[in-house]
Image (cartoon, rainbow, N blue to C red):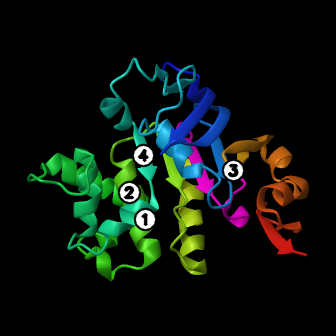
Amino acid sequence: MNYEEAIGIEGANVYLGGQEILHDISWHVKAGERCFVLGANGAGKTTLVRTVMGFNWPKFGAKVQVLGHEFGKVNLAELRKRIAWVSPFMHQVLAEEHTGLELVLSALEGALGLFRKPKEEEIARAENAMKELHCLHLRDRMLHSMSSGEQVKILIARALLIQPELMILDEPSVYLDIAGREFLLETIANLAKTRPELTMVFITQRIEDILPVFDRGMILKSGRIEAIGSREEVLTEENLKKAFGLNIRLIQSQNGRFWTVIE
């Protein structure tokens, strides 16, 4: 690893359909850091992720660097192979007739299907990734027969197969019930412990989903940075009231997570 910052964005204004979605975004995530991005629907979170992935481009004059490479001077298709993006979009394939192993192996092609016979070594790697996520028992199960929590574990195992340097968890709990969400968050906490070199970015609209391991972050509102800094600096009642337009009171549990009460 020959870079200090996993993500470096300076002065980014991003337009979609003639409308400015992100306004003057400057955001830096150090290599190995665990960062959260919090915001309501329409805050610009997905546009920010797509900008990091090189699918959206900011207006001329901005600077975007990811994993030590400046956009405009790097092969984005090759760079994306070093990034694991776990997104709710991928759940759309879960109704298809794929087994857990088949979807994990599809990461090798950067697609949602593997269109060749996998090598024995590749199968072994996929099984090891599933074992790390405690989901090897889902190897031959059809995806549509799994619970939402099990499906998300398969998606994370898929992401880990490529040995990523950056993992973006883009609202991964959005379709989960309470039990499924807690199952997922425990998985993420364990991953953070076992992969200290992995830069992790957690995108969410739910304050209670932000684990203590995500010790830096920012709040987006209407495409602008409302707050940025350490967890303690960002997750304040004043900042949350501004971001969500609600009279929010925070309660912190013994495990360090915050819960909200609307007054």
Q: Position of residue 182 (x, y in %)?
A: 60, 72
Q: Nearer the viewer, mark 2 or mark 4?
A: 4
Question: Is 128 covered by the magenta stretch?
Answer: no
* Stretch of the chain drawn in magenta: 195-216
Mark toward the start of the polypeptide (1 vs 4): 4
Name the outermost residue toward the bottom: 145
Q: Nearer the viewer, mark 1 or mark 4?
A: 4
Q: Amino acid at mark 3?
A: Ser
User: Which residue position holds label 4?
Assistant: 84
Secondary structure type for disc 1: helix
Residue at 63% x, 43% y is 34
User: Which residue position holds label 1?
Assistant: 153
Q: Position of residue 53 (x, y in %)?
A: 44, 39
Q: Nearer the viewer, residue 225 or 261?
A: 225
- Looking at the image, is 148 positioned above or below residue 198? below
User: Which residue position holds label 2?
Assistant: 157
Q: Is residue 38 left or right of residue 120?
A: right
Q: Is residue 216 left or right of residue 143?
A: right
Q: Are marks 2 and 4 in contact (CB under 8 Å)?
A: no
Q: Amino acid at mark 1?
A: Lys
Secondary structure type for disc 3: loop
Secondary structure type for disc 2: helix
Whether residue 66 can be seen here: yes
* Distance Cα–Cα, label 1 vs label 4: 13 Å
